[in-house]
Image (tube, rainbow, N blue to C red):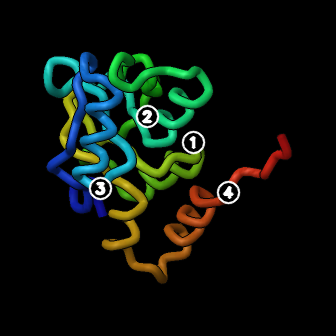
């Protein structure tokens, strides 16, 4: 199975000039926890998660109305091509401990593939997929503050 067979094609994006408040409202409205931050409509510059927002607001005491998404996002985004095999995408997700991958070609965003997409479409009897889902979902060790 190829990534393009299961990816979500209608991806909600944020512009590099959008505020964190606008991104948070997009997440709330669309019931999602991660949004690619794009420039010129489709070139992915980074990813911003609900966790990124909470940490930036709490740790750095930032104002979401006056903070740009580009200042909170994670840059250096891992991605896959639409014709990549699902096993390749899962291997990357497992290695990097990430739950969502942009699907890109020629630097253009075509879709997203997530653990949810994999869980819905994959054969749960497949050992490789089950192992990857387990490894990606493994919680980090708790630390006492």
- Tag of residue 139: 4
Vertical relation: 21 (above or below) 122: above
Instruction: Give the residue at mark 3.
Output: 31
Q: Compared to 104, does 30 lie above or below?
A: below
Q: Residue at x 43, y 39 (%)?
A: 49
Q: CA distance from mark 4 to mark 3?
A: 22 Å
Q: Is residue 122 left or right of residue 38?
A: right
Q: Are marks 2 and 1 in contact (CB under 8 Å)?
A: yes
In the rendered structure, the answer to whether residue 100 lies left or right of residue 133 reads: left
**Mark number for residue 78?**
2
Disc 1/disc 3 C-alpha distance (Å): 24 Å
Other residues around mark 1 within 10 Å, as few (<14) / some (14–19) / many (≥20): few
**Circle 3: is it few (<14), some (14-19), or many (20+) Cα within 10 Å?**
few
Whether 41 is drawn above or below 112: the answer is above
Give x and y (percent) for residue 84. Answer: 32, 48
Cβ atoms under marks 4 and 2 closer than 8 Å: no
Q: How many marks?
A: 4
Residue 83 lies, in percent from the top left, at 25, 48
Spatial separation of the CA atoms under disc 4 and disc 2: 20 Å
Find the residue positioned furthest to the right: 144
């Amino acid at each position: 199975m190829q990534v393009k067979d299961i990816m979500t094609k209608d991806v909600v994006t944020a512009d590099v000039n959008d505020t964190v408040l606008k991104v948070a409202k997009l997440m709330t409205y669309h019931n999602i926890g991660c949004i690619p931050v794009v420039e010129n409509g489709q070139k992915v510059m980074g990813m911003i998660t609900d966790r990124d927002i909470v940490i930036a607001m709490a740790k750095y005491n930032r104002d979401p109305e006056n903070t740009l998404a580009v200042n909170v996002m994670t840059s250096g985004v891992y991605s896959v091509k639409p014709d990549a095999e699902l096993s390749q995408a899962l291997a990357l997700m497992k290695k990097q401990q990430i739950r969502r991958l942009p699907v890109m070609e020629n630097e253009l965003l075509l879709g997203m593939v997530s653990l949810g997409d994999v869980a819905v479409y994959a054969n749960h009897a497949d050992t490789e997929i089950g192992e990857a889902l387990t490894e990606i979902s493994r919680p980090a060790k708790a630390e006492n503050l």
